Image (tube, helix red, strand yellow):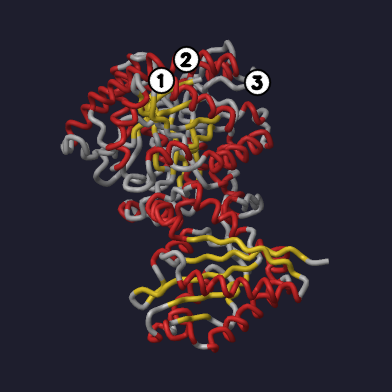
């Protein structure tokens, strides 16, 4: 089981101090948060993708490559990469490059994006967002698995004899999570390809996510990738931790009350009751998180949202200390003791390398000398016929 | 042998008791009495929107459905007939009333028979029900009975109001007894637009044979 933190990349006014960090301050802070995540023993750091203020993360692979270079064990990922407004060819190239630089310590999560005005900035239309996401991923999936791709679809210009470079590290495509909270087609696509499925598990009661995860598991088994229990599931969640429960509640309330999306709405206590939010002592966060596997089945990755709503860097780093030192070690032990033995291992590069190649060496594509086109003849790589 | 029917009364009145609630109560009582004549045992459930006011506001701004709101949604989902009653403010139905119905899933109330009622301080608001409220309930694909109820201050002493209440109640009972909702839902549910988890969390069917599902499984749309 992997544990990590994911960030929306929001730059939000701190409602307690009244200060809004500059973009420069927040970008420096996010690197420190990622480094801290590794330092306290977490496995994954993921960043969102947005193309409008008040968010900074428009170029996730640049940030993640930098973080990968500054860390040793941490897996870098996204939450999410926009599979709609990004050209799938650019996703294939950028994330394969990231995979090389991070030495396989990366994966990515795909999402559609629900901000209508963003779509036309990239020549797209939100009304086509679902078919666009599905088609774009069908192409992305091929670009990482076929050296030369001929392709034609509705949402981008056709490709003739296109090779996405660099080829994935060890010719092993990056692992993909499909993030969705309400769309059966996305769960179906994740299941069809045997990819992971991620439910953000933040805003809604658990029943909402349980339905879609159940459907994904059934379809994963239907397509022959394994049993329902072996399907690869990731969950979000959010927590605010303090040694004493009442301190957690007192400290977090002003941030909750003004948080984007749900602030100025439900009472924090009601929100805690009805959604996966935990605000409390380490033990309370542990207890609540342990209920997730009872509702959703055993899963591979638990992500926490910890740096949003204007929480200052110092507080976030302190939260990560508590999460890494007092919460996650207990969760690892407790979940290991309870987990169904059939549960799949988390999808790391090493695990997947072994699955693909066994004890054989991985393929290392070496290009032929440039001959100016890929359209005629075979693969541009020396090892292919 | 009588048949059990659920009548759900939704009132956006604010005082206790309010004339808005009183109007809805009188319709509901008439529905129960007339129902017995048609071998329907009508059980009445009441939703007072004033008790849900903060949860309705939360749901509008954050999609977060609170526990009392969820109970109200479940009651409406099982309703065989609905009496919906609101005060008129500034020449329109109360914002509390419209907000509540705007939160509901589009398919929650399909084919359910409804009596619409409104109260106001002046007869000048008399067309609010027919001109404004019917549109909302048409959007929700409900069947609103032909007689709309409206009571301004002077109507409470006018026997004409009771006649209209009788008419509306009978129209509702006739629709409830006919099994219209059941026929539409049993035979035509799939022809309406639904989302996964809509109809108050009960709509869980997934069409695996759609163009999008074929595209999801690597095919062409």
The 10 Å Cα crowd at callout 2, few under 14, some 14 to 19, many 20 or more, is some
Q: Which residue is mark 3?
A: A342
Q: Are marks 1 and 2 in contact (CB under 8 Å)?
A: yes
Q: Which residue is mark 2?
A: A330
Q: Is residue B193 above or below residue A357?
A: below
The chain that hosts pointer 3 is: A
Q: Classify B175 as above or below B157.
A: above
Q: Nearer the viewer, residue A219 or A272?
A: A272
Residue A282 badge: 1
Q: Does any portion of residue A208 appear in the rendered image? A: yes
C-alpha distance separating marks 1 and 2: 10 Å
Q: Decide: few, some or many residues near mark 1? Use Cα within 10 Å; few <14, some 14-19, many ≥20.
A: many
Q: CA distance from mark 1 to mark 3?
A: 29 Å
Could you tell me which residue is drawn at 40 percent across and 20 percent down?
A282
Which of the 4 image quadrants contains residue B211?
bottom right
Judged from the image, the secondary structure of the residue bearing numbered disc 1 is: helix
- Who comes first in sequence, dot 1 or dot 3? 1
């Amino acid at each position: 089981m992997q544990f990590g933190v994911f960030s929306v990349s929001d730059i939000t006014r701190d409602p307690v101090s009244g200060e809004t960090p500059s973009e420069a301050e927040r970008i420096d802070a996010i690197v420190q948060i990622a480094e801290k995540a590794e330092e306290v023993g977490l496995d994954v750091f993921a960043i969102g993708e947005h193309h409008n203020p008040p968010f900074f993360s428009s170029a996730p692979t640049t940030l993640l490559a930098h973080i990968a270079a500054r860390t040793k064990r941490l897996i870098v990922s996204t939450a999410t990469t926009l599979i709609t407004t990004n050209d799938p060819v650019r996703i294939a190239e950028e994330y394969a490059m990231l995979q090389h630089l991070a030495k396989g310590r990366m994966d990515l999560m795909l999402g559609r994006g629900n901000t209508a005005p963003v779509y036309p900035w990239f020549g797209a239309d939100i009304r086509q967002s679902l078919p666009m996401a599905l088609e774009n991923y069908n192409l992305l999936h091929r670009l990482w698995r076929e050296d030369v791709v001929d392709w034609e679809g509705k949402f981008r210009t056709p490709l003739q004899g296109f090779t996405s470079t660099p080829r994935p590290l060890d010719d092993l495509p990056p692992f993909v999570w499909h993030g969705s909270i309400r769309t059966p087609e996305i769960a179906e696509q994740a299941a069809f390809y045997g990819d992971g499925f991620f439910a953000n598990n933040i805003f809604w009661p658990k029943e909402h996510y349980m339905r879609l995860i159940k459907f994904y598991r059934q379809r994963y088994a239907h397509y022959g990738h394994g049993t329902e229990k072996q399907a690869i599931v990731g969950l979000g969640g959010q927590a605010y931790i303090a040694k004493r429960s009442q301190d957690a509640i007192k400290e977090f309330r002003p941030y909750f009350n003004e948080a984007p999306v749900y602030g100025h709405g439900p009472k924090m206590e009601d929100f805690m009751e009805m959604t996966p939010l935990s605000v409390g002592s380490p033990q309370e966060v542990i207890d609540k998180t342990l209920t997730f596997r009872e509702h959703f089945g055993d899963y591979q990755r638990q992500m926490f949202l910890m740096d949003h709503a204007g929480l200052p860097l110092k507080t976030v780093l302190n939260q990560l200390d508590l999460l890494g030192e007092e919460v996650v070690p207990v969760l690892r032990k407790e979940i290991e003791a309870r987990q169904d033995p059939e549960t799949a291992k988390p999808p790391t590069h090493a695990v997947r390398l072994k699955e693909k190649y066994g004890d054989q060496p991985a393929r290392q594509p070496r290009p032929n000398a440039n001959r100016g086109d890929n359209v005629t003849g075979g693969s541009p790589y020396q090892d292919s016929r | 042998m009588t048949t059990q029917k659920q009548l759900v009364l939704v009132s956006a009145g604010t005082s206790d008791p309010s004339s808005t609630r009183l109007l809805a109560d009188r319709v509901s009582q008439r529905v129960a009495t007339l129902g017995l004549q048609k071998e329907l045992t009508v059980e009445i459930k009441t939703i007072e929107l004033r008790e849900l006011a903060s949860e309705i506001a939360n749901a509008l701004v954050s999609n977060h459905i609170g526990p009392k709101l969820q109970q109200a949604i479940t009651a409406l989902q099982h309703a065989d007939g609905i009496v919906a009653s609101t005060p008129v403010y500034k020449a329109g139905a109360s914002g509390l009333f419209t907000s509540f119905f705007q939160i509901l899933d589009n398919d929650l109330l399909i084919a359910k028979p409804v009596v619409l009622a409104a109260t106001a301080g002046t007869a000048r608001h008399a067309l609010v029900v027919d001109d404004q409220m019917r549109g909302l309930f048409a959007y929700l694909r409900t069947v609103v009975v032909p007689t709309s109820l409206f009571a301004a201050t002077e109507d409470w002493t006018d026997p004409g109001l009771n006649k209209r209440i009788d008419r509306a109640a009978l129209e509702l009972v006739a629709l409830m007894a006919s099994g219209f909702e059941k026929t539409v839902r049993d035979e035509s549910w799939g022809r309406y637009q639904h989302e996964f988890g809509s109809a108050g969390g009960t709509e869980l069917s997934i069409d695996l044979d759609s163009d999008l599902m074929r595209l999801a499984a690597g095919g062409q749309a």
